[in-house]
Each structure stands twice: as C-alpha cells, then as structure tokens.
Amino acid sequence: MVINLRSDTQTLPTEEMLEAMRNASLGDDVLGEDPTVNKLEKLSAEMLGKEAALLVASGTMGNLCALMSHTHPGDEVILEAESHTYYYEVGGFSALAGLSPRFVQGEHGIMSVDKIKEAIRPGDIHFPHPTLLCIENTHNRGGGTVYPVTLMDEIAQFAHKQGLKVHIDGARIFNASVALGVSVTELVKSADSVMFCLSKGLSAPIGSILAGDKGFVEKARKVRKMVGGGMRQAGIIAAAGIVALEKMVDRLSEDHAYARYIAEELIKVGGLNIDLETVQTNMVYCDTSPLKISADQFANLLKEQGLLVSAVSTDQIRLVTSRHITDKEAGEVIATIKRVIENVL
Ligand SMILES: *Cc1c(COP(=O)(O)O)cnc(C)c1O
C-alpha cells in the first residue's frame, strides 16, 4: 500500500462527485449558458459573501485573472516573500500581468501590518505605482498557517487607505475557516477578491473559484477568456465542485486533526525538527537537518518504504493530510518515518 502525503491536490473525486458529473445539465459556459456552472458560481458567491464568482481551470489561473483584473502592466504588486503566487506560479505575475513585485517577509508566511506599512511606499517619480496587495490564507510555505480575522481586516483597511486593492490567495480558505471556527464570509469580507481551490482538500478533480464584486468578476471573465480559460460544457467540472462545497467543507477538521496527531507523534519519535505552532491546518513541515541528510534524500528513503512526501527545500519535507488518510494510514505514516529515521541514525 502506498500512502500519498505529497499534497491535498492528490485527492480523488468522491463517488457522489462522479455521479453528479455524469448527470450534470450542460451548456456553453463561454456564452454563460451552462446551468451547472451558473449554479456553482452562484453558490460560491453566496458562501464567500461576494456579489459574483467565476469558475477557473486552476488556482494559478484564478490568481492570474485577479492580478490582471486589478492592475495595469508596470504596476507594483505587494506579495509575501514565500507566497505561492511568487514561488509556484511560473512568474506569471511578471510575464503575463507585467507586474513588478515588492516582497514582505512574513512570520511563517503571516505578514504584519508594520511590515506592510514599510513596503507600501509613498508616491515618488522613481517608484512603480503600487495597486495591489496579495494575502495567502492559509499560507502554504508558511506551514499551512492561518491569518486571524482581526489581522486580515487591519491589513486590508490599511491597504485600502493607501489606495491598494486586496486579493486573497485562498487556495485553502476553507481550511482557514474550519481552523478558526469562523465563516469564510467573515474571513474574506475586507478583501476585494478571493480565489479558492475546489481541487485540494475539497476533493473535486479540477477547478478553482475567483470571487469579488460584479464589476471585478466581469473583467476577470474577459481576462479568463484571453488567457485561454473559457471552457465550454464546464458543468462537468462544476458538478463536482458543487458536491465539494456542499459535502466536503466540514470534514476538513478531520484532516487538521490527523496533521496535528502526526506532528505530535513525530516529535515523540525525535530526529526531525517540527514546529508545532505552525501545524494549524492540514500540513506538517519537517526539517531533516538533525538527521544530516537532505530533504530529497529523506523523501527518497520514505518512498522506498511506500510513503510519498514532498521535499520543498533542501532541508524541509512537507506532509499534507486529506480525506484519504484515516487512523490506519496515520499509524502507518508514523511507523514508516520512525523506521527510516532509526535506519539513518
Ligand atoms: C495550490 C495553490 C495555488 C494554485 O493552485 P493550482 O490549482 O495548483 O494552480 C495557489 N495558491 C496556493 C496557496 C496554493 O496552495
């Protein structure tokens, strides 16, 4: 049995999703005529407390459409230094949106108001014009860390006062919501736009949602078409997305409990550095340097034992829990890692 903790993107659609896809009413979504897509977009907007929403092919496309809709080429976008948009989206913000980045160093990905104040510079002939601030919640490379609501609101309020728009890369915003026990609406209320993924812990096979006010979504719809993201009978995808939103949100707390459990047990095993404070949602980052081997080497040793994890830097591996992990797998994960560590030491 292979256990896959590389990412929650690896989740497979549920039987109910496959059934819904088979039975979905379809039309041409480029013309706005796919009833299932329209239903998903309406449901998403309601759950986020935004006026409108747009189905996109991926989180990367959702962020790109947001960036291109909020800004003009040559503008400055303010990003956290380890943000997904900077780190993992092929530089689309510069290559396609024509934006100049300015980085804010977060604490485990979480930016402070003070650091953002330093980053947003006053007008000057030499500087690009800052027009957008991006916030990642949960923060992937920060460890799946969560922004408290008050901090989100304070940051957004300050950015707005400076004339910037605020976009949330909320690929895992439902994980943040479940972890905080706060509705997603409350979490994103101060942002101008938000993207979240249907295809991660929510288990849909494809798709992300971008939401905001009507004017913004109208622009983003046009940008989506421009970047080749206009899809025809996309109700096939949307049908699974509806099941994801209706059935798969509340259970995310199970993923969080397993991440916490695995982290606590691995700390008992010893040999890896794990910062329990960052284990707030469905991720566990482990530093392999006490073992004096690289993250890649450690990941390969685990792979030989049937456990797949991601090496995300020279000394960090990442374990991500999802609905495919239950008591049996969690026990197996701990036993496998313990065995490999004992062999290395
Ligand atoms: C996964 C992820 C994305 C992008 O999603 P894709 O569907 O893989 O393009 C964006 N932001 C964050 C924080 C992510 O974790």
Image: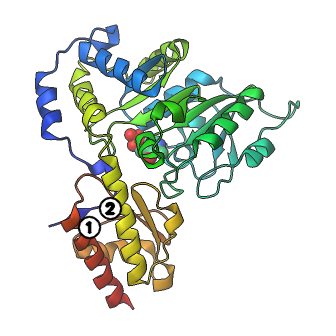
Q: Quadrant of the C terminus?
A: bottom left
Say which of 132 and 263 sits in front: 263
- Residue at image coords 24%, 18%: 36
In the rendered structure, find residue 330 and report the number of the disc placed on it: 1
For the image, the number of numbered tags is 2
For ligand 1, tell me if the residue under mark 2 lies within 8 Å. no
Task: Classify mark 2: helix, strand or loop.
Answer: helix
Q: Is residue 186 left or right of residue 236?
A: right
Residue type at tag 2 = Tyr
Figure colour scheme: rainbow
Residue appearing at x 41%, y 40% in the figure? 174
Q: Which mark is residue 258?
A: 2
CA separation in Å, label 1 and label 2: 7 Å
- Work out whether 134 lies above or below 222: below
Whether the residues at callouts 1 and 2 have beta carbons within 8 Å, the answer is yes
Quadrant of the displayed image that contains ligand 1: top left
Where residue 167 sits in the image (x, y, percent)?
58, 32
Q: Is residue 228 visible?
A: no
